[in-house]
Structure formats: structure tokens, C-alpha cells
Amino acid sequence: MALRLLARQRWLLIHSMRCYAAGADFLRDVPLKNRDGNVNVDDLKDKAIILYFSAGWCPHCRLFTPKLKKWYENAAKKEGIEIVWISRDREADHLLEYYEKALPNVPYVPFGDKHIKEFLEKYSVKTIPQARLVDSKGEIVEAEARNRIQEEGKTDAQKLARTFVDMV
């Protein structure tokens, strides 16, 4: 009985520390925007973060983005997942046009920001679309988030969202 209680207390301690650590500290210096204006990185506290790399000119992105949007709006957002969009569009007006037309109201990194190049390098993004589930320090937890959303997201969206939250 005492061992079971001790194990339970240990689990609660680890779980509470993991929940406390969730957030987006690695985005602290990144200017984020959404349809409502500037995004405060503290609003991302306690959320699992998916970095989504795509562009309006990319045919594969135009096929995947509606699936991501549906998964986000029907499951991920409710489970505490936030998407941060990092555009590969070549002009600012193209970024805004694609964002308004295709993406949910999620934070994005503004066109031309220096962090875009840093993220592309850090997360080894060679082709788009790509999605990376990251922890509060910006370390990759799931490099194949795009493939999992595309496959598992259509069969059990809620379960996948909970799995992603548990991973961070």
C-alpha cells in the first residue's frame, strides 16, 4: 500500500512538472501575429506546439492544409495544441492571402522575420509541408507530425491530439 502511494505521488510530481514546463519559451523573442493582431507568447503557455512549415504556392501544402485545419478545429485546439505557422511564401501579401484563405486563426511568424531561416535550419526543413511537434524548449518531440495528422488524424483525431499532448 505504501509503495503504491509513493508511486502515485512520484507520478503526480513528474506529471505536474511536465505540465508546468509545457509552453513556448523558445518563441519568447519571436514576433507572432494572428488575425487579432500581435500574439503574446504567454498565451501559448501550457500548450503543445506544432510548428507548421508551408506556403500558398506549394501544391502539397494546399492539399494538406485543409486536413490540418480540420484536425486543429475539431480536436487539437480542444486538447491544448497550438499551431505556429512558418510560411515559405516569397512575398508578404502572398503569406497574408494564404493565411486568410486557408489557415485557422493560429499564430504565425511575420514575413521576412530572421527567425524563419533559423527555424528552417534547426528543424531540418528541406521540403514543405512539414510539421514538427516540439516541447517548451523547442526540441523536436515528433518529427513526423504531418504524416501522423494526415493518417491518424482522419481516423481518430481526438486520440492523436491527446497522444501529442502526452508526448510533451
Image (cartoon, rainbow, N blue to C red):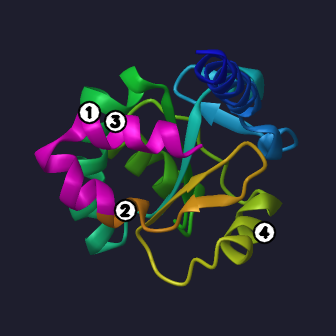
Does dot 3 land on a helix, a strand or a loop?
Answer: helix
Give whichever of discs 2 and 3 has the lower sequence position: 3
Query: Dot 4 lies on which element?
Result: helix
Label 2's element?
helix
What x and y, as percent, mark residue 7? 64, 27
Indicate the amino acid at tag 3. Tyr
Mark 3 or 1, which is nearer the eye? 1
Q: Is residue 101 visible?
A: no
The amino acid sitting under disc 4 is: Glu
First along the sequence among labels 3 and 4: 3
Q: Are marks 4 and 1 in contact (CB under 8 Å)?
A: no
- Estimate the spatial distance between the alpha carbons at disc 2 and disc 3, rounded to whole Å: 12 Å
Residue 73 against residue 164 in the figure, above or below? above
Residue that mark 2 sits on: 146
- Which residue, given by chain and number where applicable, does mark 3 sit on? 72
* Quarter of the figure that contains the C terminus: top right
